[in-house]
Amino acid sequence: MSTPVRALTLEQLRERTSEKWREYPADVLPLFVAETDFPLAPAITRALERAVAAGDTGYVASRTPLPAAYSEFARRRFGWTPDPVRMRSTADVSMGIVEILRRVTAPGDRVIVMPPVYPPFYDLVEEAGAIVERVPLRDTGAAWEIDLDGIRAALETGARAVLLCSPHNPTGTVHTSESLAALAALAAAHGATVISDEIHAPLAQPESAFTPFLAVSDAAREVGYAVISASKAFNLAGLKCALMVTASDGPTGVVRALPVEVEWRTGQFGLIAATAAFSEQSDDWLDGLLATLDENRQLLAALLAEHLPGARYRIPDAGYLAWVDLTDLGWGDNPARRILREAKVALHYGPAFGAEGAGHVRLNFGTSPEILTEAVARIAALRDS
């Protein structure tokens, strides 16, 4: 069994200069942006130290070990071996999404998103010149599901692409392989494209049965693109590296035709770090991180049940983001504002994820049990104020 990865102390974390630790004053506990509070995987630290020592700070090479490293990672973790020849790198997942959308849609085309969803999705669609078509996830009371009937209706009336978040942010849902295969079949039947943001895939808990979109069916391989990165699981967002992954000739041709500058936007340190992250040397560390996040997602459930019984929280299948419904507490459509102002805890605003986020907050539990416990205690104190 892997050793759980433990978070750094608050004193150590406040030495960081990233967004999470510089946006708010020191009396605020920051649980908003998707950065984690853990040390880097040792293999990543070693790789970056070697690069600095060698002055390996030039342009990204035209041939790199990253596609092969990801292919092997996907084989070990997901039982799927994508072809490294069918991948290209870029700066981050958002850039990959926009560049693909620009090639598979025309100005004014409609692109389906499934709220509540990662807020930049709305902006990315618009940046590509397309129009957002909202098809919310279905809440069954026990889980969130893709609304396949809603997707079908949108495609039948002309939507040209689907922007999929898998695993889903903010709910942490791992969509079933059956629902993904049905989505692929719908897209194929209507000549549409599916772009799957799989940035949280390495953080799927072992029992969640995550399946990459491109692995679910022949139809998915024909209509689909996946955009992946080590940045969320290994906390590498500032180093700028993602992969656009394809699995059939049509999508591969689209990605190969992208301007070389799209690939040159990849960060050299990001590529070096991602290659180390996806190597076998980092597997034990990742398993330890998953064990820690499992403990934290269960701890959060216990803390909310004890101190904020009006909160509704469904334990996520993947990631370190909790989607918490505070509607019954009566703190308004955007309770994170009051929580920041009065409890000094920074959470992500629920309404930013779509109208379905009214009354909700997104909480990052990729931290220490002590910080998580203190944050919930501060929020709970608002009930009596």
Image (tube, rainbow, N blue to C red):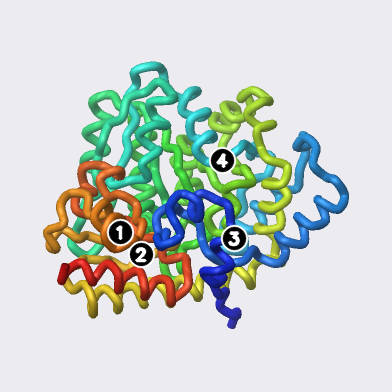
* Between marks 3 and 2 in the image, the one whose residue lies nearer the viewer: 3
Q: Earlier in the sequence, mark 1 or mark 2?
A: 2
Position of 228 with respect to 40 (left or right) is left
Residue 267 appears at what percent x and percent y? 68, 40
Name the foreground residue: 282 vs 355. 355
Crowding at mark 4 (Cα within 10 Å: few <14, some 14-19, many 20+): many
Pointer 4 residue: 92
Q: Secondary structure at mark 3?
A: loop
Occupied quadrant, residue 379: bottom left
Q: Can residue 230 be seen from the camera position used here?
A: no
Position of 231 with respect to 182 (left or right) is right
Q: Earlier in the sequence, mark 4 or mark 2?
A: 4
Please give the name of the residue rendered at 50% of the width and 46% of the height, measured from the top-left corner. Answer: 214
The residues tagged by marks 1 and 3 sit, at their Cα atoms, a distance apart of 28 Å
The residues tagged by marks 3 and 2 sit, at their Cα atoms, a distance apart of 30 Å
Pointer 3 residue: 15
Occupied quadrant, residue 255: top right
The residues tagged by marks 1 and 2 sit, at their Cα atoms, a distance apart of 8 Å
Farthest residue, direction bottom: 1
Q: Is residue 28 above or below residue 88?
A: below
Residue 89 appears at what percent x and percent y? 64, 38
Task: Say which amino acid is labelled 4.
Answer: Asp
Task: Say which amino acid is labelled 1.
Answer: Trp
The residues tagged by marks 4 and 2 sit, at their Cα atoms, a distance apart of 24 Å
Task: Say which amino acid is labelled 3.
Answer: Glu
